[in-house]
Image (cartoon, rainbow, N blue to C red):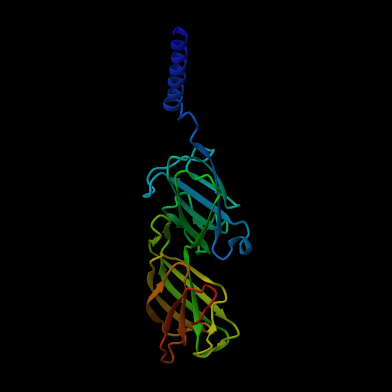
Amino acid sequence: MKRYLYIVCAMLMGIFSSCSKSEIGGNDADPTGTVVLKVTADEGIQTRIADERYVIEVYTDDTYATAANVFTNGTNRAVNYTGEFQMVLDRTKEYYCLLWADGNALDVYKVDNLKAVTLQEGKKPVEAWHGTLKIEKGTTATLTTKLKRAVSKLSLLETGTILPNSSLAVAFNQPNVFNVATTAASGTIARTETISLGLGATGTKDAPAKLNNSDIFVLSSVAGNVTDLTFTMSMNGTSEPSFSVTNVPLQTNYNTNVKGHYTSLTSSTFTVTCDDQWTVYDE
C-alpha cells in the first residue's frame, strides 16, 4: 500500500512540476528577434541615381507619435545607402515605419524628421520617394516594400514656333515641406525657372515640342496641390508681357503637361493634363 502511495505522490509531483513550468516558465523565451526590411524605389532609383540614400523611422503606433528604438544605436531611425535595414523587434507588438529615399541629396532635402522633410533654402527639388509600412505582430521573415515619388514633374509643351535665341521664364509658388506620415506637401516658397532656347522650337498641337530639356520637379501632395504659372518670353534681351496659366495641378508621381504657344504676342489656349505615366509628356 505504501508503495502505491509513493507512486501516486511521485506522479502528482511530476504533474505539478510540469504545470509549474508551463504556467511560470512558458514565457521565458525571448520574444525579440531580428527582422530585415529591404526597400526599393518605384522605377529603380538604384539604376538611375548614384549614391542613393534611404531613411527610416519606426514607431509603435499608427499616428507615428511614439518612437520604437529598434536599431543598434538605440534610436528609432537609421540612414544608409543600400536600402536594407535590420531591426530588433518585439514580436508581440506591431510597428509602423516611415520611409524616404533620394539621390543622396544631403544639400537638397533635410531629413532629420520624416514628418517634415524640408527643401533646403535656395535649392530646387530633385527626384525623391516616400512610403509607409506596417509590420505585423509575429513577423519573422524578411520584408520588402517599394516607395512612390514625393515629387511631381512639370513639362512645358510648345505647339507653335519659338524663334532662336529666345528664353522662357516660368515663375510659380511651390511647397517646401513633405510629411511622409500624411503624404501632404505644405509651405510656400517662390521659384523661377529660366529655359534657354538657343535653336528655337517648333511643334504642333498633335506633336508638341518639349521646351524644358531638364526635368522640373516639385514637392507635391499625394492628394495634389495647385499653383499658378506665370510665363515671360524674351528674345535678345527684350521681354514680352507676362501671362499666366492658373490652377495648375501638381500631384506626386504624376507628370503635369502644360501645352500651348508660349508667347503673349498671339492668342493661345493652354491645355493642362496630368499623366500617371512618368516618362510620357503628352496624352
- Identify the residue at horizontal 43%, vertical 18% (top origin): 12
Residue 17 in the figure: left or right of residue 196: left
Judging depth in this view, the residue of 71 and 196 nearest the camera is 71
Q: Residue 128 at what x, y percent from top left?
A: 51, 61
Farthest residue in the front direction? 1
Q: How many marks?
A: 0
Q: Quadrant location of residue 137? A: top left
- Identify the residue at horizontal 43%, vertical 11% (top origin): 5
Residue 273 in the figure: left or right of residue 50: left
Image position of 219 with respect to 94: above or below = below
Q: Residue 9 at what x, y percent from top left?
A: 44, 14
- Screen quadrant of the N terminus: top left
Q: Is residue 120 visible?
A: no
Judging depth in this view, the residue of 30 and 60 nearest the camera is 30
Q: Residue 184 at what x, y percent from top left?
A: 39, 61
Q: Quadrant location of residue 92? A: top left
Q: Is residue 91 visible?
A: yes
Image position of 29 with respect to 117: above or below = above
- Identify the residue at horizontal 45%, vertical 56% (top origin): 118
Judging depth in this view, the residue of 80 and 176 nearest the camera is 80
Farthest residue in the top direction? 2
Residue 50 in the figure: left or right of residue 139: right
Q: Residue 248 at what x, y percent from top left?
A: 39, 76
